Amino acid sequence: MSHFDTEIDTSGLNCPLPLLKAKKALSTMQAGERLRLIATDRAAFIDIPVYCEISVHQLIESSETEDKLIFTIEKGES
């Protein structure tokens, strides 16, 4: 499992809230820091990778447990 600097748990929140909370958290972080996002909304499995593709942030890792989706995102240079 990769290391992370900040973690937010959006379990129980539906799209687009996990993405919005991730964006807000990333906006307060320094470039190179990593955010661990926990979500239960299946749409996040599409939203988060697409957001990382169109932004400066990099999706380092994504995994799935029985009931949670876990993403590690590295903040890019703004």
Image (spheres, rainbow, N blue to C red):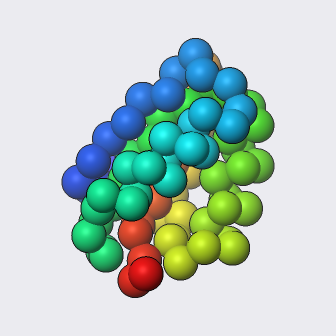
Residue 2 seen by the camera: no
Q: Quadrant of residue 34?
A: bottom left
Task: Please tell me whether residue 49 is drawn above or below residue 47 in the rendered image.
Answer: below
Query: Does residue 55 appear left or right of residue 77 in this picture?
Result: right
Front in this rendered view, residue 70 or 47:
47
Q: In percent of the image, x 38 and y 50: which residue is there?
A: 25
Residue 74 spot, x, y in % from top left: 41, 67
Residue 27 shows up from this direction? yes
**How far across and how far down the image is residue 45, in percent?**
70, 44
Determine the residue positioned at 32% across, 41% down.
Answer: 7
Q: Nearer the viewer, residue 17 or 63?
A: 17
Q: Residue at x 31, y 75 (%)?
A: 31
Give the side of residue 24 with respect to residue 32, left or right: right
Q: Please give the name of the residue rendered at 61% of the width and 34% of the height, measured from the top-left corner.
A: 17
Where is residue 57? Give x, y as percent.
50, 71
Q: Nearer the viewer, residue 22 or 45?
A: 22
Work out whether 21 lies above or below 75. Answer: above
Q: Residue 78, percent across and down?
A: 43, 81
